[in-house]
Image: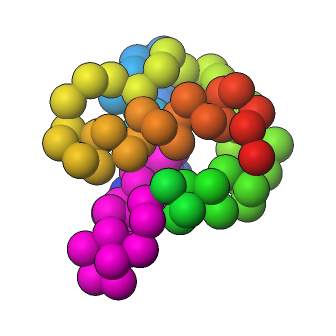
Amino acid sequence: MAAAGAAYLHPLAQATQVKHVLGAGAHAARAAELAAGESAAGHLERTVRRATPGVVDVLKRYPSAPDGGGRVGELTRLLDAALRAGIE
């Protein structure tokens, strides 16, 4: 759902739109934690390395990821912060 939602961003600068941009990466990191016992941090680092400048440009049009959302929300905020900071 999150991957498909990225195509449906609206131009209003609302923090909730960040979930559409980053949700697929955050959900994949959570799935890796649950299914494979992998570190979410390692998965997020790989996601940041793979993000294109276009993704970061779109992301920066919106406020930071909102609070809430449980573990996936936490991972979304970590991914958001890393991409905005340009960390690889």
* Picture quadrant of residue 15: top left
Tell me if residue 32 can be seen.
yes
Residue 25 position (above or below residue 55)? below
Q: Position of residue 25 (x, y in %)?
A: 48, 58
Mostly what secondary structure, the magenta segment? helix
Residue 81 position (above or below residue 39)? above
Q: Position of residue 1 (x, y in %)?
A: 32, 63
Q: How many marks?
A: 0
**Does 12 lie within the magenta span?**
no
Bounds of the magenta segment: 20-40
* Picture quadrant of residue 46: bottom right
Residue at 41% in and 74% down: 38
Residue at 42% in and 34% down: 77
Which residue is situated farthest in the right direction here?
53
Residue 35 position (above or below residue 50)? below
- Relative to the observer, which residue lies in front, 59 or 43? 43
Q: Is residue 53 left or right of residue 27?
A: right
* Picture quadrant of residue 30: bottom left
**Does 38 lie within the magenta span?**
yes
Q: Is residue 41 left or right of residue 47?
A: left
Q: Position of residue 47 (x, y in %)?
A: 62, 59
**Picture colour scheme:** rainbow
Which residue is situated farthest in the bottom direction here?
36
- Relative to the observer, which residue lies in front, 14 or 76? 76
Tell me if residue 59 can be seen.
no
Residue at 28% in and 49% down: 72
Q: Position of residue 59 (x, y in %)?
A: 61, 32
